[in-house]
Image (spheres, rainbow, N blue to C red):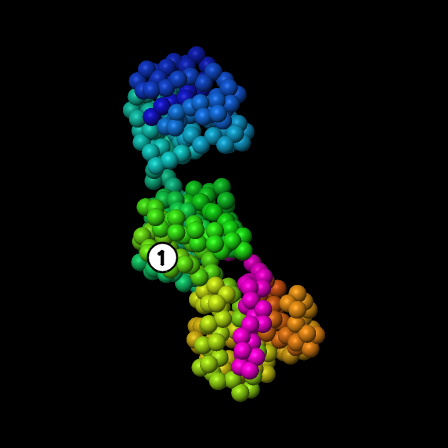
Amino acid sequence: MYLYCYARSDRAKLTGQKLIDNAEGEWIDNLESFISSYATGGQRADGTVVLLLHQEACVKLLLERLYPSDIKFPVINITPDGKYAGILRPGGYNTYQILDKITAILGSTALSAEDDRKDTAPDLMRMVMSYQMKADDEALLKEITAFIKDGGTVDVYSDLPLEMSEPVLDSLSYRPFLFQSNQKNELNQAYASANSEDKYSVFITCARMQDIPKNGKVLVLVPKIVVLGIEVSSRSDPEYSARTCREYIEKYHINPDAVVTVAVSALSKDSEAVRKIAEDLGCFVTYFDSRLLKAVRVPLNMGFTPERLDSDFCTAAACLASDNGRILMRRAGDRNSVIMTTSIKRSPVYLTH
């Protein structure tokens, strides 16, 4: 460890000097020059900032100077008399080992412990259950859930809008990396990269991920938030219709496990084909009155004829069931059997509640 110590009072400087004499380190003369030097790579990579000030001053410096300057070093607070020491911000796997060495040198009482993070850890399984998420590895899901509850931090990748109830605290457990809905290639690149690393990662997506060798550390969670609006002909063969729906869903790189409901007109709800499609996808059926579907103003950007747009029940049903969510696929399929539109529910996915 290499300590960058900052103090104002004489007794704080005596405490800091004892640290520097017993470990590698130097004094920060003023924070402006330290921050400027950090920006140009002037400090050691194994550095730790030690603030020998009362807690209020340390928090103020952390929030107003160190965070805005994007300094990545761990930040440790030591009282000027050296009696107490605690972590203000961790900065790597060994931050608590650094604190242990500091308290051993000074004889300080540690105010932070590695187990403290258990008290703020969210429950990953609770989120999985609330969205009926499909995990590609149930054993790994339990393993990562336990890791987070023990205070661990995992990378979370998604092309869906994610929200946390308490971002400041929840970011101790989740490091989110978000992609736009049209960045499927970038998401798959991140997936491949994560599978080459020896750390836990979680991908939350309705998209089909590429088929690559997995390292046993990367978990894919598929939330059931996709709506499938369909129109079926009176002569639709149930088996063929179900197979056609699944083929087109996969063709558009949507994971079939993400489908939460099949949305249809009330006239089609008892169709054998509709029941078979819902059964094949493991979801339920939502239906709407035809007058309500006709009143829906569906997006008019697909280039279909006015006659087709006026009777676009599958898109109208998908829009209603998803609360006008983003359309993923518009009027695909076999017009002699089943036509489908998929949309994704409008609300974000809440990582924590």
Q: Which residue is mark 1?
A: 212
State whether residue 161 appears in this view. Answer: no
Residue depicted at x 47% and y 60%: 207
User: In the displayed image of the protein, which residue is found farthest to the bottom?
Assistant: 235
Please name whichever residue, 314 or 18, is drawn nearer the observer in this view of the structure: 314
Q: Quadrant of residue 27?
A: top left
Q: Is residue 205 above or below residue 11?
A: below
How far from the left and from the top, in percent, is residue 160? 51, 55
User: In the displayed image of the protein, which residue is found farthest to the left?
Assistant: 104
Q: Is residue 129 above or below residue 86?
A: below
Q: For residue 336: magenta? A: yes
Q: Specify start and end residues of the magenta stretch as a single range.
A: 326-353
Residue depicted at x 41% and y 47%: 155
Our reading of the magenta stretch's main secondary structure is: strand
Amino acid at pointer 1: Ile
Residue depicted at x 39% and y 51%: 192
Q: For residue 223: magenta? A: no
Q: Is residue 85 above or below residue 234?
A: above
Residue depicted at x 33% and y 34%: 94
How far from the left and from the top, in percent, is residue 132? 44, 63
